[in-house]
Amino acid sequence: MRTAFEAFGALVPGFDAPPVDDRDDEPRRARYRSIFISDLHLGTPGCQAGPLLDFLKSHPSDHLYLVGDIVDGWQLRKRWFWPQSHNDVVQKLLRRARKGCKVVYVPGNHDEFARQFGGHHFGGIEVMTEAVHVTATGQRLWIIHGDHFDGVVQCAKWLAHLGDTLYEFTLRLNRHLNVLRGRLGLPYWSLSAYLKQKVKKALNYVTDFEAAVAHEARRRGHQGVVCGHIHRAEMRSIGGVLYCNDGDWVESRTALVEHHDGRLELVEWRPAAETAGAGHRSLMEAAA
Ligand SMILES: [Mn+2]
């Protein structure tokens, strides 16, 4: 019987290949307690593997969370694209795990094939469908990719497109529905009020997504949440919960990092060639 490691190796090219480069001493290495990255989309031409590799080399960490859409299985099925630099990223992640970094991989929707391996270890990388990270100051952060909130958000978005004509129709439907409910002895329930509320909420997809994720994190008793999926880096308090989105490595080259004192910071990677110096700039910071 194949081990889970071998099965995973067969799915992800280069996964179980021997290390190409074991040198790990780059200059100016700023160590973080934790790094959270997502939406790398390895296996697509859009993935910025080079800058990502530079970022990882420049910043060792005790914890590394891969918050989904790491390998783009959807695109790879359509068209095979796997350059050396994408292999290097996989090797770098494995090497990091070997060297004692606690690497946790929380698969997303583009790499949902990995979700079946939840609870398993692969070359020191722990696969979990969701995780909880406790910061240096004891803050509990719920780690999820975020695609599970698409249903809620997309439904509301669709309702926004109903328009006035359909709104009139729902009012009529509402009347019929309540005549029927009345016959069944059920109390009045306003379909139109329900839909109207949904439509109002649907005006902004991003805001809705953020609110839905934060709400669920609070419901589960966490102080914060780290997700990805919508490729929009953000860190702010929503209803008393710290909502963090670590962005992506397709467009924005962003990561969420935790300093050793528990302070969380959203960083944007700028390759040295572009900035002639400073590796990254801080997008925003939050007191832990
Ligand atoms: Mn996604």
Image (cartoon, rainbow, N blue to C red):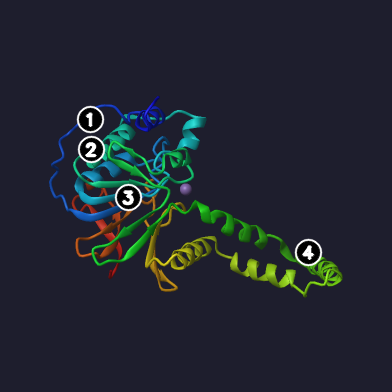
Q: Position of residue 146 (x, y in %)?
A: 47, 54
Q: Between marks 3 and 4, how big is the CA–CA gap?
A: 47 Å
The residue pinned by badge 2 equals 95
Task: Farthest residue to the top: give it.
Answer: 1
Q: Check the picture and name the quadrant holding the N terminus.
A: top left
Amino acid type assigned to the residue bearing label 2 in the image: Arg
Q: Which mark is residue 165?
A: 4
- Quarter-wise, where is residue 181 in the image? bottom right
- Examine the rendered structure and indicate whether residue 100 appears above or below residue 175: above
Say which element carries label 3.
strand
- Residue 82's disc is none
Are the residues at dot 1 and dot 2 in contact (C-beta closer than 8 Å)? yes
Tag 3 residue: 65
Give the amino acid type for the residue marked by disc 3 in the picture: Tyr
Q: Residue at x 52, y 56 (%)?
A: 149
- Label 2 or label 4, whichever comes before in sequence order: 2
Disc 1 designates what residue? 19
Dot placed on the residue nearer the N-terminal end, 3 or 1: 1
Helix, strand or loop status at disc 2: helix
Closer to viewer: mark 2 or mark 4: 2
Q: CA distance from mark 3 to mark 2?
A: 15 Å
- Mark 4 vs mark 1: which is more N-terminal? 1
Which one is in front in this view, the residue at disc 4 or the one at disc 1? Answer: 1
| First in sequence: mark 3 vs mark 2 | 3
